[in-house]
Image (cartoon, helix red, strand yellow):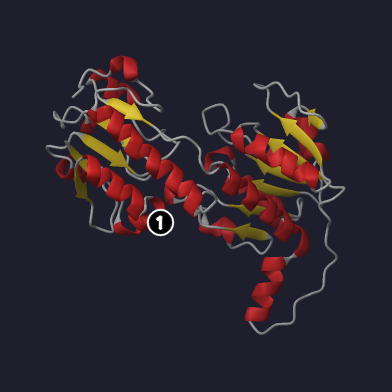
Amino acid sequence: MKVLLTHTPEFRRQYYGERSLQGLQALAEVRLHDSDVPLDAAALVRAAEGVDIIVADRVTEGRGEIFPRLPSLRAFVRCAVDIRNVDVAAASSTGVLVTRASPGFVPAVAELAIGFMVDLSRGVSRATADYHAGRKPEIVMGRQLAGSRIGIIGYGSIGRYLAPLTQALGMEVLVADPYVTIDEAGIQHVALDDLLARADYVICLAIANEETENLIGQAALARMQPHAVFINLSRGNLVDEAALAAALREQRIAGAAIDVGRAPDQMPTPELARLPNVIATPHIGGLTPQAIEHQAAETVRQVASIIKSEAPVGAVNAEHWTRRP
């Protein structure tokens, strides 16, 4: 069996790792992508000629036109949770299996959320930048997390992990998610408008889909308190960035922290990230050894199952998989 690993050399180092690569090479003949430029559709077709399985990073799109042009392809294995840029219907129509990884990044993202809250509250990044530039930092009164109110939008795996951590810090927890039932003690299940009006820290962890597109826009931001801050650790699609930039420039909210945005590879938009009351990181919420190894190792296990003609955990269209080994 032949496998194409689409990661660029940098992505391979950061998001796949040597141990998982060796595991993949023990199962199949592995073809590596050695260019620093991600594969577009045409380049992917050329690179995957004669390949049985594509193991794709999050940037490499599984566009509909690639599947009929790769007659030997049996499976498209995404080394990430997000498969919005994979045309599952097109893969299904040609009998190609599509899989996704599970979210092994939950603790990493939750920890970054707490770091963002501390930084926004105490001016760590601002003071550090001043010292690095040879300036005397302004001494500003901070906000204590204990006794403050966090509002979590979206109560999936990260939200459920984050909530008890913030409770342990003495925070009051509000959650807005119309699709879940919450039984945990001390967590208030509220409407989104109520959360926005009451929370000191608004953290966006909802999934990205048509329903949540621009969920945080002008109206939502107008409901937030002037001292409140907004944190996005989900996807840039959930935020109207022009509305957020205006609210920050006009100091209608106190600040924001963003790990994601509408720039390529879901990075923060530079125009928003450069605002003085914004903390931005380059989509590194899940970039820890434990988180990356979880997803990379999962793709190895999925490939092993596919080789045995078994639909692995994480398959999203197993009922349409006809190109079995």
Q: Quadrant of the C terminus?
A: top left
| Type of amino acid at the residue the image marks with label 1 | Gln
- Identify the residue at horizontal 71%, vertical 67% (top origin): 124
In depth, the one of 297 and 163 nearer the eye is: 297
Q: Which residue is mark 1?
A: 14
Q: Position of residue 262 (x, y in %)?
A: 49, 47
Q: Quadrant of the N terminus?
A: top left
Rendered position, 262 above or below 70: below
In depth, the one of 252 and 71 nearer the eye is: 71
Rendered position, 34 above or below 92: below
Q: Is residue 96 left or right of residue 114?
A: left
In depth, the one of 53 and 197 nearer the eye is: 53
Q: Position of residue 74 (x, y in %)?
A: 21, 28
Q: Position of residue 263 (x, y in %)?
A: 46, 51
Regarding residue 44, the answer to whether it shows in the image is yes
Q: Residue furthest bottom?
A: 134
Q: Is residue 139 left or right of residue 288?
A: right
In terms of secondary structure, where does tag 1 sit?
helix
Q: Is residue 126 left or right of residue 172?
A: left
Q: Residue furthest top?
A: 319
Regarding residue 76, the answer to whether it shows in the image is no
In depth, the one of 238 and 122 nearer the eye is: 122
- Identify the residue at horizontal 29%, vertical 34% (top origin): 303
Give the image quarter of residue 77: top left
Q: Position of residue 159 (x, y in %)?
A: 66, 37
- Identify the residue at horizontal 58%, vertical 38% (top origin): 238
- The crowd level at tag 1 (other Cα within 10 Å; few <14, some 14-19, many 20+) is some
Q: How many marks?
A: 1
Q: Residue furthest right?
A: 147
